[in-house]
Image: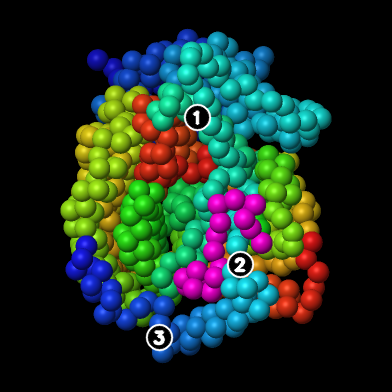
Amino acid sequence: MPSPIDIMLRGREVQQLGPWPRVTVDAVTWNFATGELAQGRVSLLGLWGEPTTVHMAVMDQTSSEIAIISLDCPDRSYPSVGLHHPPALRLERTVHDLFGLTAEGLPDTRPWLDHNNWGVRFPLGDCIDASSQPLAYRFLPVEGDGTHQIAVGPVHAGIIEPGHFRFTASGETVVRLEERLGYVHKGVEGLMRGATLERAVQLAGRVSGDSTVAYAFAFSRAAEAALQLAVPARAVWLRALLAELERLANHLGDIGAVCNDASFALLHAHCSVLREGVLRASNRAFGHRLMRDVIVPGGVTRDLSDEGREIIHAMLDNIRLRFPVLVELYDNTASLQDRTVDTGVLTPALAKQYGAGGFIGRASGRSFDARRTPGYPPYDSLRFEVPVLNEGDVNARIWIRVREVEQSLGLIDQILDQLPAGSLGTVAGQRREPREGMAIVEGFRGEVLVWLRLRDGLIERCHLRDPSWFQWPLLEAVIENNIVADFPLCNKSFNCSYSGHDL
Amino acid sequence: MRKLLFQSLFRRPFTEPAPSSSDAAVSELATALGRAARRRLGRSLSIREVDAGSCNGCELEIHALNNAYYDVERFGIRFVASPRHADVLMVTGPVTKNMREALERTYHAVPGPKWVVATGDCARDGGCFAGSYAVVGGVADIIPVDLHIPGCPPTPMAMLQGLLALLERVDTGAEAL
């Protein structure tokens, strides 16, 4: 029996070769893909627009085959995917905000990123002048007795990114959370148009500060796929080293921060010290605490010296000494577990439907890890496990992070042991004809997807999809029937990106 | 937990200056910052952080100011939850058009005298996001800025230095708004 993706591709001209096919389909095949998404046979990797085209990347649930299908919409409309497959809802609202393409049948037509402040409508499409008048946003109506609403944000109480949360509560219990995002929309995809590779990778590295390595990595791989560039072995391995250092720092920070939101400051203090150790080692080894602007198309800009290697080794030894004590403390503190166990449960069914990546998916039975599937070098030469739990609560999301810290320590050891010698990069040659590429890279939060088209050596269109797109909606689901006071805990255990989502 | 706390009593604190020059600089800076803050603000300086569109990189480093290595609270500098409790607004990011109003309202919610610290390269002029349809520009395009701390993101050390510079300026009698 042909796979759903075979049926989508059959008899069509492939417009993009590397590494996955892109084909232009008709509305019938588009709707077939929507049906397969709704049935759960394929999962949605992304949905994005161009002025008169809409693209959708899908992955087969069984074979993990990936394809991009595109539908031309000269009349500026296309059949809605979100109507049958809710994970596409916000993506389709965004395609409308940015390009003015209408998803026919979309159940929720409210603007998403466009807060009516830009002075233009459809900035990446027709770019129509519009007056900037903040309009009241229609939150979902609430009916019933004894409910009250709590409005939080966009400026929050902590040192975090801005977004608005509208809680409807009955007593202490949350009956609904509605998110409103888009406050940090910077128009990155607009700035990408016409950018050189050099500027574009810099922008990609500033989509989400905590994932600067993952974004630069994904962008560079997409550009290399488009240009069919081979990256020297040493650079390939150094990239993985950078990515694992980033994962380590973020997970250590998160484990402490989640506990801090349950007022257990001791773990937070100790985890912050370990996180700082990773950042200092990264700074000494690669010249920047967050390792920004190290990965570029073609390779990396900095080498690892013998001294850098020693510094990283010493940092790993320190974590191996101190981290197990902290894990034991977490495991043995009943008052803390009382807050985290059974709180904010994400069911495996929802995680699968939304294709939730990262520790959120893996704490709810979804084993997807882009390092393994589709996979990319050098991870095929490295030994590591992908931890999976089924409980889906805050506790499970902490444990997945703990296990991933341990895996990253092992990965960094292997990388330092096997780091090949050689050059750090190749020069990206100019190509006149349009060339497309896509890449998926596992950041600490989940898979980052980048699709781009180059023309004359410049970016014609670049789409960057943060894992948070498929995680934010699930936060709304998991908080239901929890108490308001547990929201910070649930939110931090998800730790979705605002900037990566708003872009 | 008792064991961990017990060990902490006897272990050298992370904040103690180590022999290397950068750690010594932290301690030197820390003393000066403490003195200046005390003179002007009676041992306390309350900061409200506002992300006006940043990529979250600056926030990560502001968080680091609170870890055991930098420990800003020892100088009476703390981050507060409400602008009503703040002396200083620490603003990051290029100001996006969608955050403009929230930033203005937060600024007006801070009681005087107040100071604004624009933090990070984007906060100066929009940085690499300048010119976008969705970005207004730097923080100074929206509210008066007293000090800019450069960096992408600024290191926690650079932020400490920046806050010191602000306090010195306050001490020499520059008018706050």
Image location of residue A436, percent across then percent down: 52, 39
Image location of residue B77, percent across then percent down: 56, 68
Q: Mark 3 — on which chain does it sit? A: B
Q: Which secondary structure lies at badge 2?
A: strand
On screen, residue B140 versus residue A54, left or right, reads: right
Q: CA distance from mark 3 to mark 2?
A: 27 Å
Tag 2: amino acid:
Leu
Tag 3: amino acid:
Ala
Q: Mark 2 — on which chain does it sit? A: B
Image location of residue B88, percent across then percent down: 66, 61
Of labels 3 and 2, earlier in sequence is 3
Dot 3 corresponds to which residue?
Answer: B18
Residue at (61, 67) in percent of width and height = B45
Where A134 sits versus B147, above or below? Answer: above
Q: Nearer the viewer, mark 2 or mark 1?
A: 2
Dot 2 corresponds to which residue?
Answer: B45
Tag 1: amino acid:
Phe
On screen, residue A243 versus residue B28, left or right, reads: left
Q: Which mark is residue A167?
A: 1
Looking at the rendered structure, whether the residues under marks 1 and 3 are on a common chain is answered as no
Magenta range is: B70-87
